Image (tube, rainbow, N blue to C red):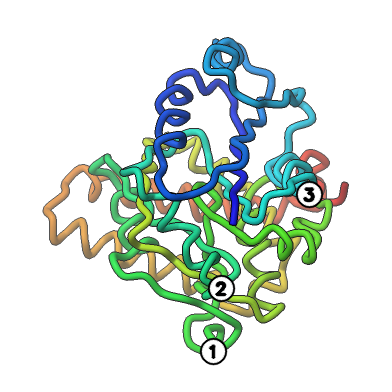
Amino acid sequence: MNVEIICPLYNAEEYLENLDKSLKRQKDIDIKKINYILTESNDNTEQILNKISAQYSIVKKEKFSHSLSREKEAMNSSADILVFITQDIEIKNDNWLKSLVQPIINSEVEATFSRQISKYNNIEKYTREKNYPEKSYIVDKNSLQTIGMRAFFFSDAASAIRTIIFKDLNGYDGKNLPTNEDQYIAYKLIMNKYKIKYCADSIVYHSHNFTLKQLYKRYYDTGVFFKQNSYLDKYGTNKTGGNLAKYILVRAVQDKNIKVLIEFMPNMLARFIGMKVGKLKVNGCKKCCYNK
């Protein structure tokens, strides 16, 4: 089976060359196409794309959509497997892609996602530990009875899905999702009795140092998503967030991570308030309208 890699780019000059080299070094997998989607940028991303002879399309900044831009390229793909990545991942080794797609090739599952590790000793270090454990697992519809919302946890920072399944499910249904498009497709997979595997041996580094303002905005968008997809609430959205906060606090105490302990409360408040305001403001938010 062959693979098409789809990667949106925006002001990606600091990542692009190393990312492209890492992709081309992957072993024992037939990569049919590496497909970059470039949102109009004000750095040298396009020049680098031309330098490395990359295949890419350009999207005007006002036209980019996390869901629609990915969906358009995926629906036009003739590859057997779609691999979605983001520009800021660092691929650990040359077997990352094989480890990610092999369970799909073996017909074990219909979709997979990689383990993510943060390089920073911040709160994200612990969120990655909690969300991306050392042991692989598979979820399906039966998992909802035991782990609830966790069954829909899925990240297209590094993920794969059988192309025919993505198309049969109609992708993201033509919706303009400002965030959580990966969770949206995971919900559809699970509810249609497909399986998703978390591949702990397929590893990428994915690291951020968000400001409180950036964190608020991310969770505002997440609040919009959950308001527009309120059917997810019955699977325990609040419980999932609470469990994560407890884990971060306990681990920071264990590590005597003073920096994280100082930042813990404002960080959690930014997330909580952003989510709440996003849910409250959604009805008047034209920018975040979900219908195409």
- Image location of residue 247, percent across then percent down: 30, 66
Q: CA distance from mark 2 to mark 1?
A: 24 Å
Residue 75: numbered disc: 3
166 to the left or right of 250: right
- Is the Cβ of the residue at disc 1 closer than 8 Å to that at disc 3? no
Q: CA distance from mark 1 to mark 3?
A: 32 Å
Q: Nearer the viewer, mark 2 or mark 1?
A: 2
Q: Helix, strand or loop at disc 3?
A: helix
Does label 1 or label 3 sit earlier along the sequence?
A: 3
- The answer, for residue 223, to whether it is visible in the render is no
- For label 2, the crowd category at 10 Å Cα-Cα, with few meaning under 14, some 14 to 19 and many 20 or more, is few
Residue nearer the viewer, 237 or 156: 156
Q: Can you identify the residue that label 1 sits on? A: 145
Proximity of marks 2 and 1: CB atoms separated by less than 8 Å: no
Please, what is the three-letter code of the amino acid marked with disc 2? Ser
Query: To which residue does mark 2 refer?
Result: 107
